[in-house]
Image (cartoon, grey):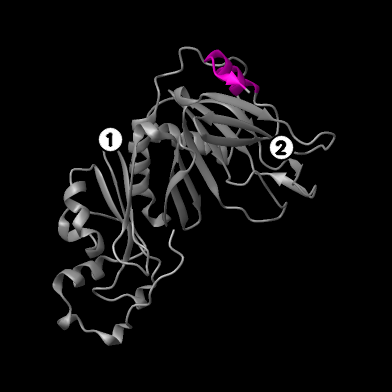
Amino acid sequence: MFSQFRRSPRRSAWSRADADPDDLREYDAFGPWLLPVSSAIDMPPRFRSAYDGLKGADYIVKIPRPIDRREACPGADLYGAVFAADAHGFTLLSAPVDAEGFMAREVAWDDVAAVRAGHNLLHADFALLLKEGDALSVTYNSVSADLMARVLAFARQRIAGPDEFRSPPGGEAEEFEGFFFNAMLSEERRGGQFMLPIYFDPPGRPCRNAQNRRRVTTGTLILLSGGELVVIDRDAPMRRRFFAHYAYRRTYICLPAVNAFRLLPPPESVPGHFMVLELIIDQQRIGIPCFRSPDRVIDLLRRRGVARL
């Protein structure tokens, strides 16, 4: 989220004996991890004026700037953002490096179309895809994955629709193993409910990119879980054959909120290209690259009365 930062004084420029105790406490706790805020003194100084308005939230979390530990010191501007989540919505406070104060944005859960979580080694993202078409994103170090898993579950509970297993789509169950099978089991353990696989593209199939160069698929799995569609993919739908690829992504879509859908076909007479299933929620467009026709997903949407464009 923050690509630049102001260099803080070197460690040799200060001493612990001369540091303010509150600044020293913040400095000692500082690192690449996210930290919960439970009192006004935990709030970074730049954001402290907002604490009274947030203190009743279920989660208040401060996000460190990407500052190397040796560049930090007590009293420096160590945190670039704070977010809060409660029963009503999500608030993000962000502070530019070279400006005073901070910016605030509040989003009600009714305005959220989907929640997305992405990981690529130590880089991680949490995003709310908004019905108005844009997204509210938080970038963090994946050492804080456990904390963000709880925030993710909290957000999902606030946007999920009613149970859809009363009329599941027909057809045979998908067969898969490896990464995607383990990902499904992980989702079931986290959510405490059964996941019905309704679409699967296995990884490793030969395909073509937009320039018609040879690639292999990375795989996509779509699960039906209560009133959610859970899309698990590897962030990019294809990769070079011998290219190491560690990214993965999970998108939780509020199924009752889907207004319409369309299937964008691959280029004519060019084999090995992806089609795109586009789910439309007000102004938000969620595109899912598919290597074969997602018939069971389309059947589910049709039976729900969702219009096909």
Principal SS element in the magenta part? helix
- In the picture provided, is 9 more to the left or to the right than 263? left
Above or below, 281 relative to 86: above
> Residue 117 placed where, x, y %?
46, 44
Which residue is at the front of the view, 100 or 66? 100
At 56% from the left edge and 18% from the top edge, which residue is drawn?
A: 300
Check disc 1 and report the residue beneath it.
88
Residue 167's tag is: none
Q: Is residue 276 above or below residue 151?
A: above
Q: Specify few, some or many for label 1: CA neighbours under 10 Å numbering under 14, 14-19, or 20 or more.
A: few
Q: Which region shows up in magenta?
A: 295-308
Residue 43 belongs to magenta span: no
Q: Is residue 32 left or right of residue 124?
A: left
Q: Amino acid at mark 1?
A: His
Image-quadrant location for residue 228: top left
Q: Residue 133: x, y in percent? A: 49, 39
